[in-house]
Amino acid sequence: MKQYLQRMFNLIKQKPFFFVLVFSFLIRIFYLSINWPLWWDAHVYIGMGKYIFTGGEIGIWESFRPLIHPFLIGLIWKLGLNPIAFGKILDLLFSLIAIAAFYKIVKQVSDKKTAFFSSLIFSVTPIFLMHTGMILTEPLAMTFGLLGLYLLLGHQHKTKIFLAGVLLSLAFLTKFTLWTYIAGVAIVLLFNKETLWGKTKNIFFLGVGFLLPLIPYLILNQYKYGNILEPFLSGSMIVGTATWLYGQGWSYYFLHFFLSNPIFLFSIYYGYLFFRRKIDVTGHSIITLTITILTLVYFIFIVPRKEPRYLVIIIPFLAFFAVKVILMIYENLKQQQKPFIKPKAFLLVVLLLLLVPMPANLSFESAPAFRTEIQQIITEKNITGTIVSSDPSFVSFLDNKIITLDGMEFAAKIYGKLEEPYQLIFINDCDLICKPKDNECVSEKAELLAQIEIENKEIFNKTIKTCNYKIYLPLEND
């Protein structure tokens, strides 16, 4: 047994990059085998992909969503492939590329040991691991973003800076909150000690690369909405709605992210050491720290909704900061004759801080699904037209146009102004949630559900826990 472990350690030392990728692949394959249900947003992206490739005949549309990820998922569907199965495969692929790019970044700005441990922590952090198979934007966006930083941090040639700008633009157009990547880079380039000509040249090539994908997107916005900024404006509005359903307060992320992932508490200490000049300060670390600070300030103080998953875009940097501190403490303990804790015991504590919270952070409840019932009704009633639904999940397995009610904030208005005939309505009343003690909303919800009952015929009714699930057909189609 001892010889086997020694061989494994020798292999890791010889090929750390290979080990990180194989380990990350295997743990993600295991995670995918659990087959967690998709989130609301994933169904929206699949529906938008169908909308794009059918000119709006089927699927759904939300203007505040970036287009690159839905376009890719829609292309998969257009090719006749299963968007859910292949969407999960793409999640796996992009997650591995992001991990590989991050390893290469840390290796070139630090050393192999730091790269190895940083990328492992990044790989197994629950909030990043759970994005494998969820068909969300983060794996693809972080792939673009980290590849862009890799080009920028390792090479100062104008071509590489230009390509970095292109990749950072694609990252932004995949997930808008990655504006912090390009902003962090631009700030550091602007205030570094290079000559004015050098600064101007670097920012110029970075900016041209960034604008190359961005300008066509803005033109598309003007054509479709009459406003080049519409997706950004509507996105800012959306994160300010139903905030009571989400976390609030400036301390939220410390309590629900850092304390839930205590390994990253070391990254906070890194920030302290950085500003006290007690740890190496390089241009590379300034860029990653600037991106991290911008992201934290944005989500803590500006975005009303608070969710731990928002911070997934800075997890690689937090992992890097944490490992730098952990290795520094470990080396200091080794040099002391009577350390307060033995070096190996310290590493064991660090391992426990990483692994113990994982089960709790990875657990989430599966919502009931009525795919079989819906498909049976679709077949029996020959429903080929529009479906109105309180959630978008059916768009992932039905090739119909779906109109979502989008919560109580918009449901009554959307239902009351339907511009086309529909053939089926699915309602989960738990999707139509009112703020506690909001009697006006409660009354509006009751009126909406009563109106739906009057104007349609109920053909399916099931209550699970406190949620009522109903399927209706319009009276004229009955």
Image (cartoon, rainbow, N blue to C red):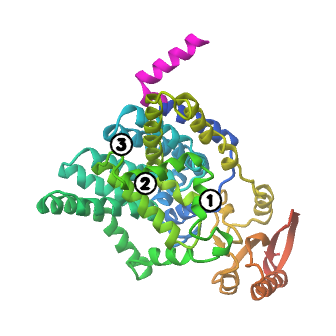
**Which label sits in the foreground, 3 or 1?**
1
Q: Which residue is mark 3?
A: 105
Is the magenta region chiefly helix, strand or loop? helix
Q: Quadrant of residue 447?
A: bottom right
Magenta stretch encompasses residue 15: yes
Disc 2 versus disc 3: distance between alpha carbons?
23 Å
Residue 275: % across, % down: 37, 56
Is tag 2's residue or tag 3's residue first in the polypeptide sequence?
3
Q: Nearer the viewer, residue 276 or 173?
A: 276
Nearest the camera: 71 or 265? Answer: 265
Q: Amino acid at mark 1?
A: Leu
Marked residue nearer the N-terminal end (2 or 1): 1
Query: Is disc 1 surrounded by few (<14), some (14 to 19) or many (20+) residues within 10 Å?
Result: few
Question: Is 179 contained in the magenta span?
Answer: no
The region drawn magenta spans 1-19
Q: Is any atom of residue 208 visible in this view?
A: no
Q: Position of residue 117 (x, y in %)?
A: 47, 36
Going from the N terminus, do you reach mark 3 or mark 1 first?
3
Amino acid bearing label 3: Ile
